[in-house]
């Protein structure tokens, strides 16, 4: 890539795209100070009122907590199942391999509304479960497995098996080998997959709409319920603004923990 | 670690020597696979199957109770009433358009990130692309509602240039969806391009190819599976969306809105399930096609 | 329009666990004084669900399904809170879920997870017929006697004189317009139907199949040949006429609204300048200095009358009764009415809201209330008492609505 003109074109295009990406987010920021309750443009006056109201909104805080709990649990399940599946398919070329990867990809590849009504129907009418915290976790874990699986699989593909073989030759059992050899090599891939899974679960609304019961509210559901109420919509903007700012933390942490995460988070390579 | 040398090496060494682990390979694979397959089989496949079965039942219109009588009426209705076909094609068209727009926008950004930016700049760019994913989907959609409105940001900025907001409708829906799913396209392409070794560019250059030729003959073919991988996200996410279109879509309807209306409004799960098989079939065909490009491995 | 629905109905009724038994003796009006808004009889026998006879021990918790604004617990705005006093008074921890439309309410109620619901008339009959809600023992409701008589024993909240809920509040679907862009000031719904092309791309309408009744109401007054007697009782020809009117209107629609923020926004920015509205939307918009006015057009209007209903298999029946009793007391009634912007069912609330409010919302104004055709679920048996024909039901309306939107 030595052509200066091509580089300049790419730089310019990247700049324009990022500008377009950030304009709506800036708009959200500005609107969180907009005195107008229906955020018309340009804002007639600015106020800190909504930030004050949001700070006292126990509903938003509670929903945030639920979202974090759901995302953590779903991520934990996805990490376990995704790693197992990734290890299982390692270097095996058995006939069902494609079927297994298809099955893992399916929950994310099929439209959320299909996954949502299918799970809703299954939980309620087939299993007779009451919708609530647990059903959200199960639903989220189901479509989160794929992110972990992809990262683990990609990482395993480029690792030479010699280290594990050496470990085995030295008399270590499979669990010891996993703990001392395989896991450390997988760590950054797991981090990347886990981060994506967490993010996926955290902002999910469609499947959640169909699997959340009466007593639990994740943050996106809270936002949805409050966006269509004139007095609440500006508060939602504040919450969104806070979320964007907070999102830098996990991404930054992940970067510090492992330089490889970035390329990993980018989709498993 | 990211060099292709390690990768080739790994491929070359392969499971040559029978280790303790791979000797009992079949059993090991089976044991490892059991929990995830059990989970997906029970929690997901069974649910999908049940949905399919439900689509063959009917519903009492007034009480909304499902009546377990086998019938193809839901599918016949989908076929016979033209409005559903229009909606299905409209949705697929929008999903395809969103995917193309995202691929066109994402490619230069991903290429710049992977091959031009400094390592530090690359990190910042990845953060910049990831951050919007954390702002709530709904809030972003409402932000676009504000931008498209009469006298909104688009009108406000575009006024001196004579540009007018397209207003709420399918155009606004397409733009909003493309915006929402853009990071899902950038990241896989970036990852795919990052794998392309720099030496390949140099080789292409040494052979006398200009930058544009290299781009066309070397980079594009190598990035193609990654583009397809990203398109699975953008296409399927657009195919099933029903929230963005109610926010910026004006009076427009997509498959998602009709399915949602039939689950919620009409409380007609059998018909909703029947209509939901349309995106399922479309996605299965899409996945089958994507598999041939090797995109599923680079998802 | 569709052959399918017709074909399965008899089968469904035969098998019907909770299906409609189409009773021959129709027109059995449930003891209600016959005002404009009263469709004839109920024409169906609800499943036999026992009524609670006395209050038992409070369960300590209750799941409430409510229109947004009907059960505020202060979690969004500490100043807006009538759920916490209820929790303190009864020890019943309240879990509130809001639903955006009547139809969502029905499907959520069917999950069996909720104890009480604030059902509008287009949901209540479906819930009763589906066996999802139980008859209400009004003697267990403390202030039932204070509720405006014209809200009791109506076709959307009772069957054969048996109440299935406690009236909560009501309002009309009015015609709102931007005074600076719409002239002359409209007086008829014709402004959004036959004359809608004047405001091409700026007309808005409510996004629900039930909006078909608005078109039917207009046709009822302007096209007497069609013989529409009740906008919720349309035979196939009448429905087709309403649908074609709405398809015409569709050409001029900017967007259909279903949540009120969307409509306030659209009127504020001018994306919409005329269309149906609720009083609360008009007041919110006016509060934002949008030059809007809302009128009750000469044809009358459709409207809603909401009822608190108790689930047939409520897990917390006593707390549910405690809630229904509490929420219809004057104080919470006045709070809800002012926050939500509707007429409270309990007229005593006027002593707390002030008379100006009650006048604006016509709380005790029976004449006004009589001009409103309250949302009622259309069923295949004609609600206007016709026996020589079958009417179109809500399923057909839903399908028609999809086709209208196209």
Image: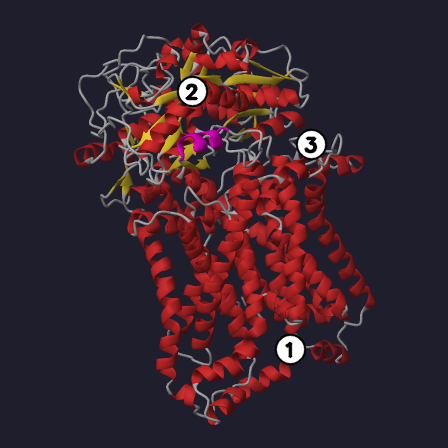
Does residue A2 belong to the magenta stretch?
no
Task: Report the magenta residues as a range.
Answer: C82-91
Residue C255 falls left or right of residue C305: right
Q: Chain of mark 1?
A: B
Q: Which residue is mark 1?
A: B2
Residue at x-position 54% and y-position 19%: C279
Q: Could one spot residue C1 in this view of the protein?
A: no
**Residues at marks 3 and 2 touching, judged by CB atoms closer than 8 Å:** no
Can you tell which quarter of the image residue C94 is in?
top left
Residue at x-position 18% and y-position 37%: C15
Q: Residues within 10 Å of mark 1 (few under 14, many from 20)?
A: some
Q: Secondary structure at mark 3?
A: loop
Residue at x-position 62% and y-position 23%: C285
Measured as percent of width and height from the top left, residue C259 is found at 53, 31
Residue at x-position 27% and y-position 11%: C31
Q: Residues within 10 Å of mark 2 (few under 14, many from 20)?
A: many
Above or below, comparing residue C338 to residue A224 in the picture: above
Q: Could one spot residue A191 in this view of the protein?
A: yes
Q: Nearer the viewer, residue B99 or A198?
A: A198
Nearest to the eye among marks 2 and 1: give it.
Answer: 2
Above or below, comparing residue A12 to residue C365 in the picture: below
Q: Which residue is mark 2?
A: C329
Measured as percent of width and height from the top left, residue A224 is found at 53, 40
Q: Residues within 10 Å of mark 3 (few under 14, many from 20)?
A: many
**Disc 3 from disc 1: Cα separation:** 49 Å
Q: Secondary structure at mark 2?
A: loop
Q: Nearer the viewer, residue B85 or B15?
A: B15
Q: Chain of mark 2?
A: C
Measured as percent of width and height from the top left, residue B4 is found at 63, 81
Q: Which residue is mark 3?
A: A40
Q: Quadrant of the N terminus of chain C?
A: top left
């Amino acid at each position: 890539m030595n052509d200066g003109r091509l580089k300049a074109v790419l730089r310019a295009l990247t700049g324009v795209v990022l500008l377009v990406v950030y304009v709506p987010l800036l708009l959200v920021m500005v609107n969180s100070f907009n005195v107008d309750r229906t955020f018309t443009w340009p804002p007639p006056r600015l106020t800190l009122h909504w930030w004050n109201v949001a700070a006292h909104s126990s509903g938003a805080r509670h929903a945030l907590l639920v979202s974090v709990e759901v995302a953590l649990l779903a991520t934990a399940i996805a990490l376990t199942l995704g790693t197992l599946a990734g290890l299982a398919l390692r270097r095996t070329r058995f006939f069902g391999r494609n079927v297994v990867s298809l099955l893992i990809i399916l929950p994310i590849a099929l439209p959320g509304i299909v996954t949502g009504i299918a799970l809703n129907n299954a939980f309620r009418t087939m299993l007779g479960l009451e919708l609530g915290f647990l059903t959200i976790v199960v639903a989220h874990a189901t479509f989160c497995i794929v992110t972990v699986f992809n990262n683990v699989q990609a990482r395993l593909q480029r690792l030479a098996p010699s280290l594990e073989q050496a470990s085995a030759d030295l008399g270590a059992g499979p669990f010891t080998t996993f703990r001392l050899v395989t896991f450390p090599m997988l760590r950054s891939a797991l981090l990347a997959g886990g981060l994506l899974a967490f993010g996926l679960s955290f902002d999910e609304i469609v499947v959640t709409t169909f699997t959340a019961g009466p007593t639990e509210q994740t943050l996106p559901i809270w936002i949805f319920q409050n966006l269509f109420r004139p007095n609440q919509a500006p508060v939602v903007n504040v919450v969104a603004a806070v979320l964007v700012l907070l999102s830098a933390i996990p991404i930054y942490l992940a970067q510090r923990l492992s330089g490889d995460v970035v390329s990993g988070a980018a989709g498993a390579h | 670690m990211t060099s292709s040398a390690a990768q080739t090496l790994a491929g070359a060494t392969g499971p040559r020597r029978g280790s303790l682990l791979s000797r009992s390979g079949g059993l090991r694979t089976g044991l490892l696979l059991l929990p995830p397959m059990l989970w997906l089989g029970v929690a997901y496949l069974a649910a999908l199957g049940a949905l399919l079965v439900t689509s063959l039942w009917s519903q009492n219109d007034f009480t909304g109770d499902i009546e377990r009588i086998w019938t193809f009426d839901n599918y016949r209705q989908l076929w016979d009433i033209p409005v559903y076909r229009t909606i299905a094609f409209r949705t697929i068209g929008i999903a395809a358009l969103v995917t193309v727009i995202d691929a066109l926008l994402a490619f230069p950004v991903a290429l710049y990130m992977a091959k031009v930016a400094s390592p530090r700049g690359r990190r910042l760019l990845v953060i910049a692309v990831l951050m919007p994913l954390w702002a709530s989907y709904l809030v972003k959609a409402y932000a676009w509602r504000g931008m498209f409105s009469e006298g909104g940001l688009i009108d406000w900025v575009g006024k001196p240039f004579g540009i007018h907001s397209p207003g709420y409708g399918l155009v606004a829906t397409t733009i909003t969806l493309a915006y929402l799913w853009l990071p899902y396209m950038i990241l896989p392409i970036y990852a795919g391009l990052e794998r392309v070794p720099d030496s390949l560019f140099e080789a292409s250059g040494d052979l006398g190819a200009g930058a544009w030729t290299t781009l066309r003959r070397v980079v594009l073919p190598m990035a193609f599976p990654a583009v397809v991988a990203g398109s699975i996200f953008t296409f399927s996410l657009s195919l099933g969306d029903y929230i963005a279109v109610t926010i910026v879509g004006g009076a427009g309807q997509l498959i998602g809105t009709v399915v949602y209306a039939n689950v919620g409004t009409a409380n007609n799960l059998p018909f909703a399930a029947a209509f939901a098989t349309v995106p399922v079939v479309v996605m299965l065909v899409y996945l089958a096609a994507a598999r041939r490009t090797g995109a599923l491995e680079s998802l | 329009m569709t052959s399918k629905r017709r074909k399965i109905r008899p089968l469904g009724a035969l098998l019907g666990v909770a299906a409609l038994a189409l009773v021959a003796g129709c027109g059995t009006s449930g003891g209600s004084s016959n005002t404009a808004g009263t469709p004839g009889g109920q024409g169906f026998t609800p499943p036999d669900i026992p009524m609670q006879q006395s209050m038992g021990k409070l369960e300590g918790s209750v799941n409430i399904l409510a229109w947004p604004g009907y059960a505020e617990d202060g979690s969004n705005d500490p100043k807006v809170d009538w759920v916490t006093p209820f929790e303190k008074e009864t020890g019943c921890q309240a879990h509130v879920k809001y639903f955006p439309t009547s139809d969502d309410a029905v499907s959520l109620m069917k999950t069996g997870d909720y104890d009480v619901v604030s059902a509008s008339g287009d949901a209540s009959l479906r819930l009763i017929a589906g066996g999802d809600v139980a008859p209400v023992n009004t003697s267990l409701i403390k202030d039932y006697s204070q509720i405006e008589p014209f809200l009791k024993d109506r076709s959307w909240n009772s069957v054969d004189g048996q109440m299935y809920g406690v009236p909560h509040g009501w309002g009309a679907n009015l015609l709102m317009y931007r005074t600076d862009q719409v002239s002359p000031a409209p007086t008829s719904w014709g402004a959004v139907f036959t004359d809608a092309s004047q405001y091409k791309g700026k007309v808005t309408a409510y996004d629900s199949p039930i909006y078909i009744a608005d078109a039917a109401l207009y046709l009822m007054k302007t096209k007497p040949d069609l013989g529409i007697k009740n906008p919720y009782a349309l035979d196939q020809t009448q429905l087709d006429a309403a649908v074609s009117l709405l398809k015409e209107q569709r050409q001029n629609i900017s967007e259909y609204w279903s949540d009120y923020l969307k409509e306030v926004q659209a009127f504020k920015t001018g994306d919409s300048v005329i269309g149906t509205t609720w009083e609360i939307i008009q007041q919110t918009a006016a509060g934002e200095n949008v030059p809007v006015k809302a009128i009750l057009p000469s044809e009358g209007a459709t409207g809603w009358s909401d009822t608190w209903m108790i689930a047939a298999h409520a897990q917390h029946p006593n707390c549910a009764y405690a809630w229904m009793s509490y929420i219809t007391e004057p104080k919470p009634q006045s709070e809800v009415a002012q926050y939500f912007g509707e007429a409270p069912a309990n007229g005593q609330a006027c002593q707390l809201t002030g008379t100006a409010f009650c006048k604006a919302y016509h709380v005790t104004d029976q004449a006004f209330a009589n001009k409103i055709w309250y949302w009622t679920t259309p069923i295949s048996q004609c609600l206007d008492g016709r026996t020589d024909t079958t009417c179109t039901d809500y399923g057909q309306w839903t399908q028609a609505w999809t086709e209208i939107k196209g």
